[in-house]
Amino acid sequence: MKELPILETLIFYALVFLTIILAQYFAVAEGTHWLFMQRFATAGGPRGWRLKLPLSPAMSSDIRLSVLSAVIFAFCAAAMLLAYRQGTTRLYTDAYRHGLVYLGTSFVTALLLQDTYFYFTHRLIHRPKLFKWMHRGHHQSTVPTPWTAFAFDPPEALLQGLFLVGLVFLMPLHFSVLAAVALTMTAGAVVHHLGFRVFSQTAFGQWLGKWLIGPSHHLLHHRRYTVHYGLYFTFWDRLLGTENALPSADRSAQP
């Protein structure tokens, strides 16, 4: 069978990835929204959870921006797959090629690099001249919901999508690791935009809240703009003075 031209192949891959990304977005966002905002709102939940989140007037905008972001992410994924087929990336399929230890460490390394990239680009697009055309759409929801998770203005979606594209050229990554990073990013984005505290007031919960970005961190970010720029970890916020320390901030994030 004759192979499709590169452009047609890229578009075909992008359509496949777009279908997967949109199905995942609507399933996860709606499922999470129903579970936490509707079921728990009537059945009750752990003490301290904010259960009755108002439906944001910007929710339709969140969905529209998320669909646009999905298109951009789909083309980024398609470009990675096309580059892999042409042998220009450092993606690999044999789990033993670099050893099983590297398989795990490469996942952690990728998350640390992504967290660093996100922190500094996130701070950058909060500068007034960039904010209005790269990040304003995401902040239309002052109280975020799961639908806000990928509500990026197209330039920001491209900025974030290019990270993984660049990463597959810079370091060896097994396909399973790449998929795990993408799933972690998706799960993290949804959890961060729940709009209420997840970490409990137990010693372990407070320890997690000290080192990992959670919904309370990001709710404060949506309200104050100048704190909590991290993606997964609080390291850069703590080091560079952009952290509003929990649990006091956690309490202030509640209604």
Image: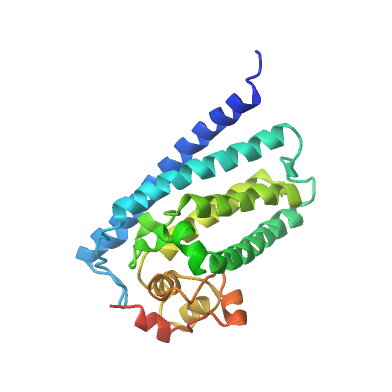
* Left or right of 152 in this view: 99: right
- Horizontal side, residue 222 vs residue 113: left or right: left
Please name the residue shown 51% across and 76% down the image.
208
102 sits left or right of 118 in the view: right
Quadrant for residue 160, please give it.
Answer: bottom right
* In the rendered image, the vertical position of residue 111 relative to residue 2, given as above or below: below
Quadrant holding the C terminus: bottom left
> Quadrant of the rendered structure where residue 239 is?
bottom right
The furthest residue to the front = 129
Q: Is residue 170 visible?
A: yes
Question: In the rendering, at what x and y percent does residue 163 appear?
Answer: 63, 53
Q: Where does the image place residue 77, in percent across and percent down from the top left? A: 58, 41
Q: Which one is nearer the viewer's eye here, 242 or 13?
A: 242
Of all residues shown, which one is farthest toward the top? 1
In the rendered image of this protein, does residue 116 appear above or below residue 224?
above
Q: In this view, does 249 lie above or below 100?
A: below
- Report if residue 172 is visible in the image: no
Q: Which of 169 and 209 is in front in this view?
A: 169
Residue at image position (54%, 56%) is 184
Q: Nearer the viewer, residue 49 or 203?
A: 49
Q: Can you give x and y, in whole percent of width and height, for residue 142 in the image?
A: 34, 67
The colouring scheme, among rainbow, by chain, secondary structure or one colour, is: rainbow
Residue 31 vertical position relative to residue 4 in the rendered view, above or below: below
Residue at 59% over, 53% down: 181
Q: Single out the residue that lies furthest toward the bottom.
A: 248
Viewed as shown, does residue 56 lie left or right of 245?
left
Q: Residue at x 42, y 69 (%)?
A: 215
Q: Where is residue 196 in the image (x, y as percent from the top left)?
A: 35, 71
Residue furthest to the right in view is 98
